[in-house]
Image (cartoon, rainbow, N blue to C red):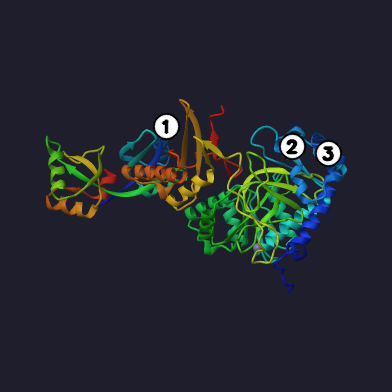
Amino acid sequence: MKVEQISIFIENKSGRLAEVSGVLGDAGINIRALSLADTSDFGILRLIVNDTDKAFNVLREHNFTVSKTEVIGVEVPDSPGGLSSLLQTLDKNNINVEYMYAFVERSGDNAVIIFRFDDVDAAIDVLTKNSIRVIEGKKLTSI
Amino acid sequence: MEQQPTIWNPVAECMPREELLTLQLGQLQQTLMRVAENVPCYQGKFKEVGFNPGDLKDLSDLANLPFTTKEDLRLNYPYGMFAVPMRDVVRIHSSSGTTGKPTVVGYTKADLASWTELVARFMTAAGVTNEDIIHIAFGYGLFTGAFGLHYGSEAIGASVIPISGGNTDKQLMIMQDYRSSVLVCTPSYALTIADRMEKQGIAPESLALRVGLFGAEPWSEQMRVEIENRLGVIATDNYGLSEVMGPGVAGECLCKAGMHLAEDQFIAEIIDPDTCEVLPEGSVGELVLTSLTKQAFPMIRYRTRDITRLHYETCDCGRTFARMEKTRGRSDDMLIIKGVNVFPTQIEEVLFQIEGCQPHYQLVVERENNQDKLEVQVEVNEKIFFDEMKQQRAFVTEAEKKIHSALGLSVKVKLVEPSSITRHEGKACRVFDNRKN
Ligand SMILES: [Zn+2]
């Protein structure tokens, strides 16, 4: 169910994002989803890629500070209120969302949202019980 | 098999202090005669205060003599301070100046012999023997570090690997294959090696390293603990500066209770860096050194700019020489921010407590609207990098709070990418004071 996400520390200065994607591109790695959380000084770039270990190593070799985190990809009906009812379900079951961002590709008619929960296993449990589709990690990186 | 000594030169190193003071007085009188005769800079300085070398009757009279500073060495660049003709000089070294010209120092054959002796002393004090394989990762060149340790190692009869600085992967390969048992480098480079070992998955137990001789920059006790844990060595400190001799001026024994200062070759004073008054025994202040045996490049009351303290009780090891505490930074590095004295090492200690490892950091001081602002830039690493923004920001806030309570000064902590802080010959430049610009 879970998928590994790579987080990268980047300083808030021009060209750093391009450098990260350049390093990955040169290594033949495809970026499946990305989000950037930033402050005035620095940012945390989060990526889902097709080869997590390779991306992790190649970024480290290029002197980036990187870490791996477990996240999950959830299918959300691409209709009004789709996301909102999903969030309500999570809230009702006391599942905390640390952050979330949208996946680039779609899965059939549905949008894919990446979630980071403080308790991933509990979240998966709640989602499956409520018949919300959690996408296989392997499927997600190869979409 | 010949037994290795635990004290290289017991006659000198364990000399009763009364005898030592008599020896110092005689040697000081001779040194003053020689510089007054041969070094125009000292002729001028002595004349200015109306001093004749014959006037010095007691060691306490030394306090009446003028200081020698780095500026004097610069004004006399390159050979003006030499006290012997060039035909007697067999070696030139120089120290990397942060600004302007470097300073040039010279050694006669006898000077090289005493330097070798001093290094052999502190290496022996750290437990190094002729069985050891010494991995010298100081840069060979004009810098005194590598050659000093090289001579000392050979005197002891140990095997020297003169690998020089840089290329950490190669250093590690040689360390593994040649079974290096003693590592010689700066403490910050020791941590660079530890980082690389971790990345390559090399366990310290798989190496033959057992002793580290670290010097050439100030480092904290916490940093010692970290190096010892991560490299699996006994880490000892040694002190020296090329203007005075190079490494060997002082070095730690295994009691780790301060570095024994070679008082049979140098007189040490502690002064207040602002008033220049000699401070009473046991005070913290700037170390001032006078050479007693050097021929080519004698120094009278050289202001080292290093802040430390001296202890005079006899050490458990039996050596009677004064013990010098780890330097707390340089009087040049001391920042006065909003009237508060700040040493980079204080901030280093706080960062160490938070991170649990040696931080790469630098301090930038700016003046905005007549207000001094101190920014502490810290290189992020995997231990202090969090995927969640609120944790990452909490780290920054905690660092700011802790530094505030340690210094009584509010600072801004800024996280920067790895390797973005400039390192110069393995030494990090810690302070950028932009108020002067
Ligand atoms: Zn001792």
Does the beta carbon of the residue at mark 3 sit less than 8 Å from ligand 1? no
Specify the amino acid type for callout 2: Leu
Q: Where is residue A46 in the image (x, y as percent from the top left)?
A: 33, 41
Where does ligand 1 appear, by image quarter? bottom right
| Relative side of B104 to B274, left or right | right
Callouts 2 and 3 on one subunit: yes
Q: Which quadrant is home to the N terminus of chain B? A: bottom right
Disc 1 target residue:
A13
Q: Give the SS element for disc 3.
A: loop
Disc 3 target residue:
B39
Q: Which quadrant is home to the C terminus of chain B? A: top right
- The front one of B213 and B309 is B309
Q: Which of marks 2 and 3 is nearer the N terminus?
A: 3
Specify the amino acid type for callout 3: Val
| Relative side of B365 to B246, left or right | left
> Chain letter of disc 3?
B
